[in-house]
Image (tube, helix red, strand yellow):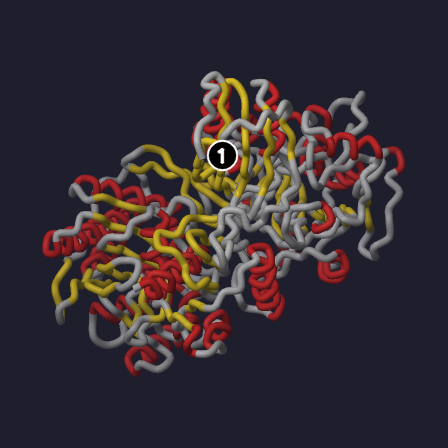
Amino acid sequence: MTVSAATDRRRVRVRIDSTGRGVGFRAFLYHLARSLELAGFAYRDARGVVIEIEGDTSAVSHFLQRLDHEAPPRAAIERVDTEELTLAGETAFRIVGSSHLADGAGPGEPVVPTSLVAPDIATCDACLSELVDPRNHRYRYPFINCSDCGPRFTIVRSTPWQRARTTMAGFAMCERCQREFDDPLDRRFHAQPNACPACGPTARLLDRRGRTIDPGAARDAVRAAAHALRAGAILAIKGIGGYHLACRADDAQSVATLRARKNRAEKPFAVMVADVAAARRLAWVDDTEAALLSGRERPIVLARRRAAARLASSVAPGHRDLGLMLPYSPLTHLLLADTGLPLVMTSANAPGEPMLIRDADALARLAIMADLFLVHDREIASRADDSVVRAVTMPDGRQPLMIRRARGYAPASLPLPVPAHPAVVAVGGHTRNTFTLAAGERAWVGHHVGDLETVEAWQSFREGIAHLGRLCAVEPSTIAHDPHPEYLSSRHGAGQPAARRAVVQHHHAHFAATLAEHGEMGQAIGIVFDGHGHGEDGAVWGGEILCGDVSEVARVGHLWPVRMPGGTDAILAPWRMACAWLKELQDGIPAIPHALRGSVSGEDWRDAVELAQAGLRSPMTTSVGRLLDAISALCGVCPEASYEGQAAIELEMVADEHERSAYSMPVARKRGQLVLDARALVRAVVHDLESGVPVPAIAARAHRGLAVAAVRAAAEVAGRRGITTVALSGGVFQNVLLLERTTALLAQEGLRWLVPRRLPPNDGGLSYGQAVVAAARAEG
């Protein structure tokens, strides 16, 4: 097209590729166009938004500049293309229907959507102001929302993003709400969950039998629930993405009761507080952590607990850190304000089961855990557990580290460094499971499913994959999965025709996920440390030095292998790994270490040694996670665990952060592989324990020694192969002490380091890596 001869006026078409829907973007465009006296129209399609804008040349230029700088953050603009058009003589700007769903595709070319639906968004300041204003007709309304906030992913049943396709379909808007919804100048323009007390969902307080409790003098269900919490009750709360259990976090008896009823002996509970100031009374919260706490995603943030924090010690036993979160829905804002207390807020499900989202299931399963139920009549379409992050100090400053990516983040898409043609579904691992759908240049990592240990988790996994496929309007033709024969996710993949399967080794998937997140397509070195993954030799890998790219990888080094007595039994019995490492240092039956006497019987100890000697139910393992378990047990920190990773986590928690010494861990070459020989490290741990060196110093020296050895191995590979990029991944790198030291040493070596930013280093990022590898191999 040619530019009009009327040089003082201009018309352009703007194509915006974005990944957020339902975030007030078209209302923003309307306001911006009207403020600049521009004419034209805007509509949404599968890729984002198309705009035709006409007016004064300088005003059009201002529009384009402000579009880039002032768009709502959740709009997630990734690309803006402009095309000059001839003037059409329009005099007004309007929003038109989203009917051009194939716009931008060539003839016969499939449209891969990038614009689906936004993750759930925490209540905005404008809605909070209305929530606490007695003069506002939405005063204390637990479901207040607008175009800038509220439920999105958890209420949508299908796309496009329209009320009729959400769980709000059964709530017809009243005349007042409809006017807001239809007015482009209103904050609630096209806010699909828009509602008020006259037409929207309602909250109720129920007893264990599901009978409604009259709130009486409390006047509403939330006030009555808050009164019960203050009195020590355990409350089941239907949230945005599932049910939670709550109690007073400052009351030891309430926390003990919740632990007993939920059968959760030691794993930490998250604590919800009213605001950042309240968080800072309980923990040392720096600016990075404060920004994470108060961000629109509202994750749980791990921060260092204050010694004088007025909380029950049983909230996070054995931990220096607290998992803190701020209210993210109107209902939780009201509850925190009405109680005036920090509250334990934990997902209301039995161990190994997914979050409960259906009212009947919650009443049936939680009656033995909760005294009361605070519920509402808006259905939940998709589960969304709470996200978890922590801040770490990297060579480039304080940065967030994702531990669990769920509510607030999922299912926002990530770019693919290589297009997925054909489309891929990747099914992740067995623990911390997520799944990923990849098509074209985008990948959608689904919500956190958890461990695939139960029928309920398996059903949630399959339903989640199907639901994400419907939202993306993509039918994948390739399924990528882990090679482990016992993973339920792998069995799901192995049931497909061989031509449709891509088997991706566990640690290659970790490695590829980090590379792909940073758009890295070249050769790199990988340091992948985790608890377990099926190795190409049938052993349990977990301390791997890799070299390759997103398509292919070679194992060039690993941790010294030892037996894993009892197989998976050793995961929850760290003393077994202590036994295995001691056995590696000497012949015969090693003596039970002093710190384990009283925790392990002589008979059990001998049985473990005999299993290791005979190789019965004792696979070889190179797992760094199991090495840290062993050191934790040797130090008497955690001989027995109630959840995977507990021993290693508690070892990190006791480590002296001011200790600067490091144990030696030689890096030798054996059969063409670099071997990180941890025998010397374990021997040093035993020596220092016998010499009376404090456990915090020993824990720190072990972490630092492991970091030194890993970097030494990476530097040797880099020197031999001329590679300067090192990618870190695997669940062990959730350990801040190890991650910070390793990246600092890599920087000192002059090596470029990459760590996961938008995805967890643990198995929560595995499916994305599987999808990347499958796409790269298909292209190659």
Q: Quadrant of residue 478?
A: bottom left
User: Which residue is at the front of the view, 585 or 394?
Assistant: 394
Quadrant location of the C terminus in the rendered image? bottom left
Q: Is residue 428 left or right of residue 657?
A: right
* 186 over 672 or under it: above or below: above
Residue plotted at (21% across, 55% down): 684
Q: Position of residue 585 (x, y in %)?
A: 21, 68
Residue plotted at (41% across, 59% down): 420
Q: Position of residue 413 (x, y in %)?
A: 48, 48
Q: Is residue 666 left or right of residue 698?
A: left
Q: Is residue 145 left or right of residue 264?
A: right
Residue plotted at (26% across, 40% down): 659
SS at mark 1? strand
Quadrant location of the N terminus in the rendered image? top left
Q: Position of residue 411 (x, y in %)?
A: 53, 50
Circle 1 residues within 10 Å: few <14, some 14–19, many ≥20: some
Q: Position of residue 375 (x, y in %)?
A: 76, 48
Q: Residue furthest left?
A: 720
Q: Is residue 194 left or right of residue 473?
A: right
User: Which amino acid does the dot numbered 1 rest on?
Assistant: Val
Asked whether residue 276 appears in the rendered view, the answer is yes
User: Which residue is at the front of the view, 3 or 673?
Assistant: 3
Q: Which residue is mark 1?
A: 14
Q: Quadrant of residue 38?
A: top right
User: Which residue is at the front of the view, 492 or 610?
Assistant: 492
Q: Residue furthest front?
A: 5
